[in-house]
Image: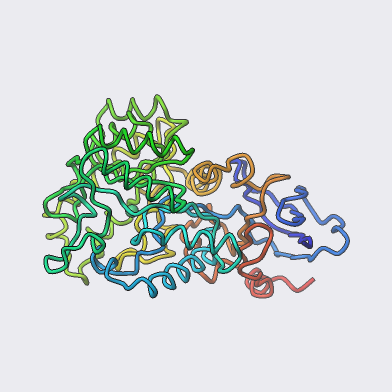
Amino acid sequence: MGSVLFTNVRIIDGSGAEPYIGEVLIQGNRIQRLTRGGRSQPATGATVIDAAGATLMPGMVEAHTHFSWNDAATLMEIQLMPLEEHVLWAASVAERYLKAGWTSCVGAACAKPRLDVVIRNAINEGLIPGPRYLAASQEITVAGALGDETLPHIPWPEFSFGVVVSGPEEMRKAVRMFLKYGVDQIKLNLSGDNFVPGARADTTWMTDEEVAIAVKETHMRGKRLSAHARSCASIKQAVRHGIEVIYHASFTDEEALDMLEATKDKHFVAPGIAILYAMLNEAEAWGITRKKATEMGYEIEWAAACESLRKMHKRGIRVLPGGDYGFAFTPHCQNARDLEFFVKYLGFTPMEALLSATKYGAQVMMKGDELGQIKEGYLADLLLVDGDPLTNLAILREPTRMLAVMKDGVFHKQPEIRAARSRFGLSAA
Ligand SMILES: [Zn+2]
């Protein structure tokens, strides 16, 4: 592998330090040298990228990704996509995420049993381009809860969105099946969701016996779990059982916050708040008016989630971006919008929002000591961005501002330096 020297870059290194001008030398797939200040001699044979002051930052991590969501407005429409088309779809979405600057993604459930595993393996084998990826299971759920979507005239279980279990032994069987397939993370639907008429977001569905057996089987094999947990009781259940990744976490009380804080080094919260916002404010084209969304419970959940997540952030609980992009009203690759929402509604500074996508994102990827920062020896997942994300986070979701994307030392979006130069009013070196 060759080497690449980024020179004349404004570095946001992902440590929390203020940005500085400097140079970064990549050798193979690692960051070899990081220097502050002006031009120094490049390593012999390095490709020199003069970035004319553009921002170099660590690649972003999406903590709650669904490659198989296919821009539909309902779970059933996602599920009815035939398998062959679905594989190609998920592969194309994976590539789009990478090019949009998401160099790592955590799978939060897929729509068919082996879909995520197959995509992850294909990425790792170099068959298709995509981010570093942790593959999820389908959603495991119980009768009547989120994920138990079956069409009345197609009652066969393989057409349900999630895997529906009843009792510890069926749970064990489902979990073992997904572990056999090779998932990195088992997904349990502990709470309801306002998407589902009979199972609102503040309701809780699984017994402790079912959750316990899932956790036991998964941890025994060194794998991790995530939970769809919107209700207060389901958040506590997730913490009690040691489920590492908690999705949504909308409704809390003091006890839930205390529990989360007490084991905050263990847990990650990825709320996916964009979908709450979109359902309330932007889903009218799909028949969900503000009035309807409010009746569905989204106004109450939005207010509760903002309050809960603000408090979590204050208590130092890791709240990460990502979640439920891939529906009609939350298009794929707009995921960086979460960072804007974190600042606007959850009390983050722009730097804290960036760290949630980089330094802390690396931790949810289980690579906190070698990913998510521009630091000597770390993996070379880097973004070259036209402009300053700290003054305008919205540029992170504009394709034209993403000048280059490097993953593992390889460009997946080639640098468009000439464009950057003219925008910065500088002449070519
Ligand atoms: Zn989700």
Residue 157, horizontal then vertical, whole percent: 22, 59
Frontmost residue, 38 versus 239: 239
Quarter of image, res 87:
bottom left
Residue 273, horizontal then vertical, whole percent: 32, 51
What scheme was used to colour the molecule? rainbow
| Left or right: 204 in relation to 334 | left
Quadrant of the image containing the N terminus: bottom right
Residue 362, horizontal then vertical, whole percent: 55, 45
| Left or right: 296 in relation to 214 | left
The vertical placement of 223 against 10, above or below, is: above
The vertical placement of 399 against 262, above or below, is: below
Frontmost residue, 235 versus 345: 235
Label tally: 0
Quadrant of the image containing the C terminus: bottom right
x 47%, y 62%: residue: 118
Frontmost residue, 406 versus 289: 406
Frontmost residue, 335 versus 38: 335
Residue 43, horizontal then vertical, whole percent: 86, 58
x 63%, y 57%: residue: 382
x 32%, y 73%: residue: 82
